[in-house]
């Protein structure tokens, strides 16, 4: 059996260097810092300890630069006990949900603008979503009148909600 290869200093090559360990710890700290902007209910869904949740909440309130830096180091230390891959996957899923919801809202806004602007947009919408004809036949004329009278009103907002719900 062959002995394990060792570096000139006599340590095993299988163990990470001090620089690599430091890079790993900084990566965990950065991952912990990415938890700061999450709302509390989203933070509760993450696979992290209650102690880490409290540390993140505390870090949000700290305004002093040095205090915040030290709190982020503490978060990094708590992150050592977290499964980083599971946390990254949970964060990806959370941001994906947010991106999909935002895309649906933007699409509904674009459709509303097209529908209110002319009948061609309304015809295109009804070709794709024929089940919404009854609602839109009442909402579109009211929304157009509101815009002509000086600004968006209740029907304009209801039209958006109807389109968004259908797209979602």
Image (cartoon, grey):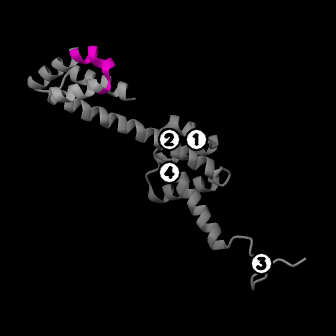
Q: Are marks 4 and 2 in contact (CB under 8 Å)?
A: no
Q: Are marks 4 and 1 in contact (CB under 8 Å)?
A: no
For label 3, count other residues whose C-alpha is less than 10 Å away and answer few (under 14), some (14-19) or many (20+): few
What secondary structure is the magenta-colored segment mainly?
helix
Q: Quadrant of the N terminus?
A: bottom right
Alpha-carbon distance for marks 3 and 1? Answer: 38 Å
The residue furthest front is 127
Residue 150 x/y as whole percent: 9, 26
For label 2, count other residues whose C-alpha is less than 10 Å away and answer few (under 14), some (14-19) or many (20+): some
Q: How many marks?
A: 4
In the drawing, does residue 60 fall left or right of residue 5? left
Q: Is residue 35 above or below residue 129?
A: below
Q: Secondary structure at mark 4?
A: loop
Residue 135 position by quadrant: top left
- Does the stretch in magenta take in 134? yes
Residue designated by label 2: 94
Alpha-carbon distance for marks 2 and 3? Answer: 42 Å
Q: Is residue 130 above or below residue 94?
A: above
| Residue at screen point 65% across, 67% down | 21
The residue furthest left is 149
Q: Are marks 2 and 1 in contact (CB under 8 Å)?
A: yes
| Residue at screen point 49% across, 55% down | 68
Kindly tell me whether residue 141 is visible in this rendering.
Answer: yes
Residue designated by label 3: 11
Residue designated by label 1: 46
Please tell me whether mark 4 or mark 2 is closer to you in this view: 2
The answer to which of marks 4 and 2 sits earlier in the sequence is: 4
Q: Secondary structure at mark 1?
A: loop
| Residue at screen point 14% across, 27% down | 151
Nearest the eye: 134 or 2: 134
For label 4, count other residues whose C-alpha is less than 10 Å away and answer few (under 14), some (14-19) or many (20+): few
């Amino acid at each position: 059996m062959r002995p394990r290869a060792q570096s000139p200093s006599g340590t095993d090559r299988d163990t990470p260097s001090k620089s690599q360990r430091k890079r790993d710890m900084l990566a965990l700290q950065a991952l912990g810092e990415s938890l700061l902007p999450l709302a509390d209910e989203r933070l509760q869904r993450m696979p992290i300890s209650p102690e880490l949740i409290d540390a993140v909440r505390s870090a949000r309130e700290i305004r002093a630069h040095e205090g915040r830096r030290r709190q982020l180091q503490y978060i990094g230390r708590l992150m050592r006990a977290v499964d980083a891959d599971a946390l990254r996957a949970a964060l990806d899923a959370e941001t994906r949900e947010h991106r999909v919801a935002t895309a649906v809202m933007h699409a509904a806004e674009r459709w509303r603008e097209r529908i209110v602007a002319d009948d061609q947009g309304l015809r295109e919408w009804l070709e794709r979503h024929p089940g919404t004809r009854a609602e839109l036949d009442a909402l579109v004329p009211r929304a157009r009148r509101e815009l002509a009278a000086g600004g968006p009103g209740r029907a304009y907002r209801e039209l958006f909600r109807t389109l968004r719900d259908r797209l979602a």
